[in-house]
Image: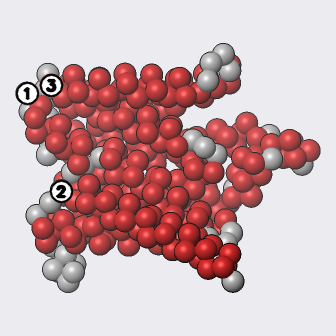
């Protein structure tokens, strides 16, 4: 492990940037799971990937391009993510069809668009692999600073509005009696979700984003005695899974993103098994 933290800028940026992404995802993931929005967590990263692929096709560059190309790709990721999110939210507000229909259609369209945009890109084969596994090693100092600001900003917003977000999420009628409009806090929550996904996909890829949106949150909510501790456990599991997965990928010469998600899945499985054994012991006693 000391080899990864030996001062090499390449690994330092990859580890710190990846940690920033998975920490953001682990915080947002608690809300996604509790509000049963996991399907949105599937579709939005794919829409974000389509936005990144569109920019790379237009510019003729890829993950290894210049800082300006990365900035354009991040803009494309943000536009695609928030555009897709707006369509989903408007569809839910109108309520003419089940929300799952829109999410499924968005995932299918975004997946097809991503593959087609990558296919017509001169560097298509390379970019397909980069989009799927995430190019953590291409994180520059500017990307790292942006991730740091995003992490601080999201954490601050969650802390400042934690009670309002929870109240509006799980008891909107009571929130209205207290003079709080749940629509405003829903918009804030969706904005945080969209921003985290767009930034995370550009940095670590859709697989890492979706995996760490769901797996640490599922494990934390199963093991935590309360919601506050669930956030802490989710963040701790995400950090442990990413650092452990990155080390394994480094030693085994494997793509970092899928290995980190696999380690997170193992952690979720172990927590689930431990909780079931605990319930059986209580029942037996």
For label 1, the SS is: loop
**Image quarter in which the C terminus is found:** bottom right
Please say whether residue 13 is visible from this viewpoint: no
Position of residue 223 relative to residue 258, above or below, is below
Residue at 87% in and 47% down: 174
For label 2, the SS is: loop
Q: Earlier in the sequence, mark 1 or mark 2?
A: 1
Q: Is residue 122 left or right of residue 55?
A: left
Residue beneath disc 3: 119
For label 3, the SS is: helix
Q: CA distance from mark 3 to mark 1?
A: 8 Å
Decide which of 69, 129 is in the foreground and name it.
129
Residue beneath disc 1: 122
Residue beneath disc 2: 255
Q: In the image, which disc is placed on residue 139? A: none
Position of residue 139 relative to residue 182, above or below, is below
Do residues under tags 1 and 2 come within 8 Å of each other at their CB atoms?
Answer: no
């Amino acid at each position: 492990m000391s080899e990864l933290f030996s001062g090499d800028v390449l690994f330092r940026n990859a580890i710190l940037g990846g940690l920033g992404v998975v920490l953001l995802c682990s915080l947002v993931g608690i809300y996604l799971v509790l509000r049963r929005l996991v399907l949105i967590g599937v579709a939005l990263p794919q829409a974000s990937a389509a936005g990144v692929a569109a920019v790379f096709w237009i510019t003729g560059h890829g993950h290894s391009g210049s800082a300006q190309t990365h900035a354009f790709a991040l803009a494309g990721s943000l536009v695609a993510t928030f555009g897709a999110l707006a369509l989903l939210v408007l569809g839910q507000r109108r309520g003419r069809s089940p929300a799952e229909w829109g999410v499924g259609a968005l995932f299918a369209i975004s997946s097809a668009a991503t593959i087609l945009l990558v296919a017509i890109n001169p560097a298509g084969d390379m970019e397909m692999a980069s989009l799927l596994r995430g190019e953590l090693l291409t994180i520059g100092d500017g990307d790292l600073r942006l991730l740091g600001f995003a992490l601080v900003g999201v954490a601050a917003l969650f802390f400042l509005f934690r009670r309002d977000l929870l109240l509006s999420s799980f008891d909107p009628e009571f929130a209205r009696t207290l003079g709080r409009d749940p629509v405003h806090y829903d918009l804030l929550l969706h904005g945080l979700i969209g921003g985290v996904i767009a930034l995370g996909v550009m940095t670590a890829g859709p697989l890492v984003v979706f995996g760490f949106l769901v797996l640490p949150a599922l494990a934390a909510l199963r093991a935590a005695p309360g919601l506050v501790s669930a956030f802490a456990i989710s963040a701790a599991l995400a950090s442990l899974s990413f650092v452990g997965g990155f080390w394994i990928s480094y030693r085994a010469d494997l793509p970092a993103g899928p290995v980190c998600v696999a380690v997170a899945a193992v952690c979720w499985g172990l927590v689930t098994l431990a909780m079931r054994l605990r319930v059986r012991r209580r029942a037996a006693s």
